């Protein structure tokens, strides 16, 4: 591991983080305590899942950009959190 390497680079970039996500959900769905949170309490229709994924990916993009910023000019320009909608 290089000292200049970022956490997401060390995890394998987007591909590595998506593998981690898949493993996490597979284990959560196999766990009798966690499974209800992912299959009964949250809506699972495709439209909802797509909207949630887009919001999470947007937030992750903002966080990644801001965590790498060396100056204020490199910060993500968002000033307000978008309304969570379809």
Image (cartoon, grey):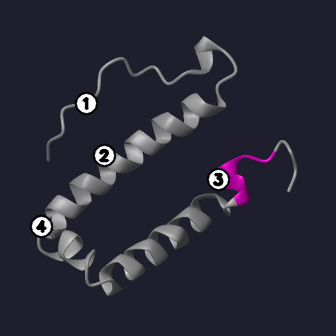
Q: Quadrant of the N terminus?
A: bottom right
Q: Residue at x 53, y 69 (%)?
A: 20
Residue 27 to residue 45: above or below: below
Estimate the x, y position of residue 50 in percent, counting from the top left: 25, 60
Residue lying furthest front = 33
Residue under circle 4?
41
The span picked out in magenta is 5-10
Badge 1 vs badge 4, beta-carbon distance below 8 Å: no
Residue 4 to residue 51: above or below: above
Residue under circle 1?
82
Q: Residue at x 70, y 21 (%)?
A: 70
Badge 2 vs badge 1, beta-carbon distance below 8 Å: yes
Estimate the x, y position of residue 82 in percent, counting from the top left: 25, 30
Estimate the x, y position of residue 22 in percent, counting from the top left: 45, 75
> Please, what secondary structure does the residue beneath circle 2 have?
helix
Instruction: Residue 55: give its label.
Output: 2
Give the CA distance from mark 2 to mark 1: 9 Å
Residue under circle 3?
8
Q: Residue at x 58, y 59 (%)?
A: 14
- Magenta region includes residue 7: yes
Give the CA distance from mark 1 to mark 4: 24 Å
> Please, what secondary structure does the residue beneath circle 3 have?
helix
Sequence order check: which comes first, mark 4 or mark 2?
4
Give the CA distance from mark 1 to mark 3: 25 Å
> Please, what secondary structure does the residue beneath circle 1 have?
loop
């Amino acid at each position: 591991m290089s000292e200049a390497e970022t956490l997401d680079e060390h995890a394998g970039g987007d591909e590595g983080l998506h593998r981690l996500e898949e493993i996490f959900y597979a284990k959560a769905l196999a766990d009798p305590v966690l499974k209800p949170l992912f299959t009964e309490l949250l809506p699972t229709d495709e439209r909802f899942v797509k909207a949630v994924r887009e919001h999470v990916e947007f937030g992750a993009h903002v966080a990644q950009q801001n965590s790498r910023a060396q100056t204020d000019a490199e910060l993500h320009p968002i000033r307000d959190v978008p309304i969570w909608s379809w």
